[in-house]
Amino acid sequence: DCFELSEEAGVAHLILRRADALNTMTPQMWRELEPLLEQLHRSATLRALVISSTGKHFSAGMSLDVFKGGAIAPDDRSAEGRAALVDMLADMQKAFTRLDELRVPVIAAIHGGCIGGAVDLVAACDIRYASEDAFFCIQEINIGMAADLGTLQRLPKLMPLGLLKELAYTGRRMGAARAAACGLVNEVFASQAQCVEAALACAREIAQKPPVAIWGSKQAIHYARDHGVADSLQQMGWLQAAIWQNANLMEAFMATQ
């Protein structure tokens, strides 16, 4: 199995466990990830999700098996063959879109290399923590590709455009400190263990809040990310009306007395 999943007190912890292969992403990983995310999305008890990894690197990105095995090897001799790549990529993009749209907040705890497809993955998370040894690399340009699973679409909303272009065009590594300085990473920790514990602590704090208010906040933030201010304010009115609960407000007010 590519993942280990556990849940305690409303906090799920999904761990990449292919350390011997640098947690590279294989077709098997995609087959496992989508049903896991669907299961988490439908869970009645889940309040937050932490994603972490094992071994030297968070993930070295796409496995070469994906290319060698034909999973992403369209017939580039014909327009029909190249067009088939559109559907292939759409299927792979769905998993990270599902992560982006998960009804609960997702926190990534990143250590070591976060390379290629792994950047696509963490870009779809809500919060990113990193250890001091973490680095990010849009590796696709170094092998003659453009990043195609969300990095170039989500990172412009998360970091300065000029810096993203620098990384996307050069394939350079960006360390944890610079990632934090530009806002891609929320906080940097001395070790992987401290990073994971901080992510779990944040998830436990989120889990204590009214779940419908957390869901509503995520919906509003993502809608505002993808729409104009006027539309987003209108959506906020409908959303607040849908999730409003007098009991939650009274309980919160009483707790401050």
Image (spheres, helix red, strand yellow):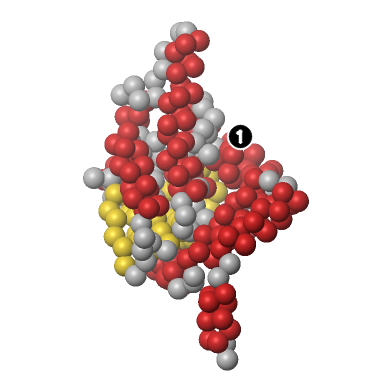
For image coordinates 29% across by 60% down, the residue present is 6
For image coordinates 33% across by 54% down, the residue present is 15
Answer with left or right where residue 3 lies relative to residue 76.
left
Q: Amino acid at mark 1?
A: Tyr
Please give the residue where the numbered disc 1 appears in the rendered image: 169
Specify the farthest residue to the bottom: 257
Answer with left or right where residue 111 lies relative to residue 215.
left
**Residue 239 at x, y percent in the picture:** 61, 58
Disc 1: CA contacts within 10 A as few (<14), some (14-19) or many (>=20): some
Q: Quadrant of residue 226?
A: top right
**Residue 148 at x, y percent in the picture:** 51, 33
**Residue 82 at x, y percent in the picture:** 48, 15
Q: Is 71 rendered above or below residue 202?
A: above
For image coordinates 44% across by 69% down, the residue present is 207
For image coordinates 32% across by 33% down, the residue present is 27
Question: Considering the numbered disc 1 on the image, is that residue within a helix, a strand or a loop?
Answer: helix
**Residue 163 at x, y percent in the picture:** 65, 45
